[in-house]
Image (tube, helix red, strand yellow):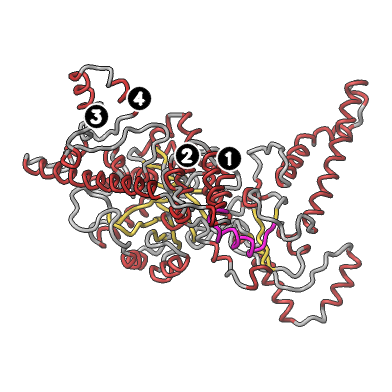
Amino acid sequence: IVQKVLRKLCKKEVIELKGDMICVKQGDMVEPSNAGKERSRRDKKRKRSSEEASEMKEVDAHALSPSNTGGVDRKNGGNNKDKYGLSFDYKYILAPMVGASELPFRLLCRKYGAQAAYTPMMSSQKFSTDPSYRSREFQTVPWDRPLVCHFSANDPNEFALAAKLVEDKCDAIDLNLGCPQRTAFVGHFGSYLLEPKDRKLICNVVSAAKKAVSIPIFVKIRLLDTLEETIKLCSQLRDAGASLITIHARYRASWCRNGPGARDGPAMLNQILEIKKVITDIPIIANGNVITYEDVEKNLNFTKADGVMSAEGILDNPALYLPRMGSDGKCASEKVVVLAEDGFATGIPSQSGGNSEMELEQKKKKRKFEKKLREIESIEEKMTAEGSGSITKEQEKKLATKSDLKKLLDEMSFSNGESAQVNPSLDLSQSSAARTATLKDLYKSANDKLALAHEYLNLAKKYPTIIRTVVFHTRRMCRDLLNEYQLMEDCVACKSLDEVESVLLKCSKYRDNPHLFRFDKDKEKQQKEALARKRQEEGKRKNYEARMIRKAKREGKSDLEYYLRQGTELPTIDLVKRLKALSRNEQLATWKKSHSQHCMAHHLDPNGCGRSRSCAFLHVDAKGDLTFNEQDECAG
């Protein structure tokens, strides 16, 4: 690809999206047709200034660098490593998010500048033992790289086995030591493993995976109570085998913390700066306080970190990292972006309208391969009619190339938007099939949230994901428009991709034709009431947790979180239906086993709970397949 770009794309500056940049100086570049002409041209080129010649050498060296053509140099087995021994770019990272960093969203963020991406958190216990869980939770394609598989774990063997199962499908394995959710508390993983009593365990988890696989082991943590403790933790994880540590610069979660909690206030980036001064032999990634690209630059400059990871900022703007490739100025229309497979599958036009020299060359190759395939088919017909002895050794060699030839044709058909099925084992990141767009084109779609949402929806159609994840991303990307046109509740209620698309089309219609929108006061009232109920439930949860901790203190329990472990499971819609058919005593017996923190009357009584705000239990709707809970979506 690089050789063709250097020879074919005249007078353009080219950017390779999968890595960093390929900068081609403006000026005519001529492809030699034969050795004699090349010598003649070389004589003419000698008259050029030494400055221009050195410029071109610099361009070639930069263009062919693996760090600028997708990170890992796969042809050389990934031997081109940075000073830390890592073979891919990790300066601009999409964070791991449960229900949010799935394949369609990863591909969208990669198109707009993310260099590396993490999968959602996966349970190493389930992943290592349940094939159906693996196929459901882990989805990728060959051009979804560099990719970091992100696992929760509290067992060294389970984590090592899970890592082994994805070793050949990703570039690194990450251990979750940052999740603050209640599920992490109950399951004893995430930031709840950062207690001193679990230090030996988590180091064993890291070292077990390090021994089991040949790819790097990463860790994502939160801050401990003091800076000294956090530095000690980082040192221990590094010594156990961690090749990179991401630090979410907020304190680890604790139900009995005094002061800032897991989600409170700004991230304490000053602590990352101090940690980076001490931990210098592995990369430190900063996570927190990133909403805009200006924040990205400030974060990197202040912390001196080796990279930055974004979760909240990139959820609202999947094109968060786009400015790293250049500003949206006059020169943006002169910069050509080479897009990998799904980067161009979403409708960004090529600058030449489909008739560039690269594309013409690709069509020419395709016709040549099709001709060879027809020749092979005629040889097969001859064999069928006259027997295998009727063909020559040369023809036998041609027959042996049939499968490879078909793979190449499938790959070319896919890159041209045709319906051919691509062999998933092909490394399409090395394919010569590529489309281009200008940086200006990318900024145009990046600045239109509806366009981004439509791109994401197209990817979700191609790589199916659960509907609540699609709804979640649509809500985040188009929040302002959905609120402006009173379509937020309509979006949340969507049960199919077609319904989500219908909501987006309504937004487009109202935005393009403002006179068609009529503000609905009754709808506004209903939305305010729903928001008030949500805030009320959040307040009840905090009050309940405080009461349970006080109760444990009164009873002298050493584990202040004891009562918070009991009855936390949210009842399902199916369970509620079954319980309604039972007697009161049977209902109570079942409820106390797993759901004692939740109000039984709210779920089972025909008129609901009559105590309203004075009720000491939680009023949270039973969960079903389509239940949307934003707190659950962003764990980690």
- Kind of residue sitting beneath label 2: Cys
What secondary structure characterizes most of the magenta part? helix
Q: Disc 2 designates what residue?
A: 494
Kind of element beneath mark 4: helix
Earlier along the polypeptide chain: callout 2 or callout 4? 2
In reply to whether residue 437 is colored magenta, the answer given is yes
Q: Quadrant of residue 386?
A: top right
Q: Which residue lies under the disc numbered 4? A: 574
Q: Earlier in the sequence, mark 1 or mark 3?
A: 1
Stretch of the chain drawn in magenta = 436-451
**Disc 1 packing (10 Å; few <14; some 14–19; many ≥20):** few
Mark 2 or mark 1: name the one nearer the start of the chain.
Answer: 1
Q: In the image, which is nearer the foreground, mark 2 or mark 4? A: 2
Which of the two discs, 2 and 1, sits closer to the camera? 2
Residue 260 picture quarter: bottom left
Name the secondary structure under disc 3. loop
Q: Which residue is tagged 3?
A: 607
The span from disc 2 to disc 4 (Cα, nearest Å) is 21 Å
Q: CA distance from mark 3 to mark 4?
A: 19 Å
Of residues 77 and 12, the one nearer the viewer is 12
User: Would you place residue 165 above or below residue 104 in this image?
Assistant: above
Question: In front: mark 3 or mark 4?
Answer: 3
Q: Nearer the viewer, residue 332 or 68?
A: 332
Left/right placement of residue 603 relative to residue 519 reads left
Residue at image point 54% right, 53% down: 516
Residue found 70% across the figure and 72% down from its top: 25
Circle 1 sits on which residue? 461
Q: CA distance from mark 1 to mark 4?
A: 29 Å
